[in-house]
Image: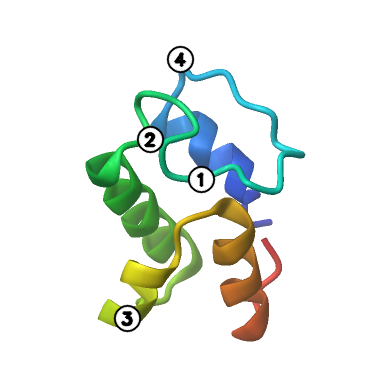
């Protein structure tokens, strides 16, 4: 079973406190989730789910819900 996106956030940012039900959860929601942290998060998502985001997707995906919707459109439940 593949982990949920929030599991990946906890793995990448173990000390961060966040509300996983926040629809705006994304880049800047906590200090560690800056632009570099976000890029690393997207790389972890790619590795975990065996896919590759396009350059356009990488620049557009800023929130957890956007990443989840993108994966759902690709037939991946996250």
Indicate which disc residue 33 carries.
Answer: 2
Q: Which mark is residue 15?
A: 4
Q: Is mark 2 on a helix, strand or loop?
A: loop
Q: Distance between the residues labelled 2 and 1?
A: 7 Å
Please identify, in this view, whether the residue under mark 3 or under mark 4 is nearer the observer.
3
Q: Quarter of the image holding residue 68?
A: bottom right
Q: Which residue lies furthest to the left in this view?
A: 36
Tag count = 4
- Which residue lies at the image location 47% right of the left edge and 32% below the top edge? 11
Residue 56 is tagged as 3
Q: Measured from the top left, where is residue 62 in percent x and y?
A: 45, 57
**Distance from the alpha carbon under mark 3 to that under mark 4:** 30 Å
Label 3 residue SS: helix
Q: Which of marks 4 and 1 is nearer the N terminus?
A: 4
Is residue 16 shown above or below 11?
above
| Horizontal side of residue 37 vs 74, given as left or right | left
Check if mark 2's residue and mark 1's residue have beta carbons within 8 Å.
yes
Look at the image and tell me in which quarter the C terminus lies.
Answer: bottom right
What's the distance in space between the residues labelled 2 and 4, CA to CA?
Answer: 11 Å
Is residue 54 something one can see in this rendering? no
Q: In which quarter of the image is the N terminus?
A: bottom right
């Amino acid at each position: 079973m593949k982990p949920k996106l929030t599991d990946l956030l906890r793995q990448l940012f173990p000390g961060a406190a966040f509300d996983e039900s926040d629809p705006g959860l994304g880049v800047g929601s906590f200090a560690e989730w800056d632009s570099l942290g976000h890029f690393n998060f997207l790389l972890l998502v790619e590795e975990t789910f065996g896919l590759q985001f396009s350059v356009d997707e990488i620049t557009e995906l800023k929130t957890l819900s956007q990443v989840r919707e993108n994966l759902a459109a690709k037939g991946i439940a996250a």
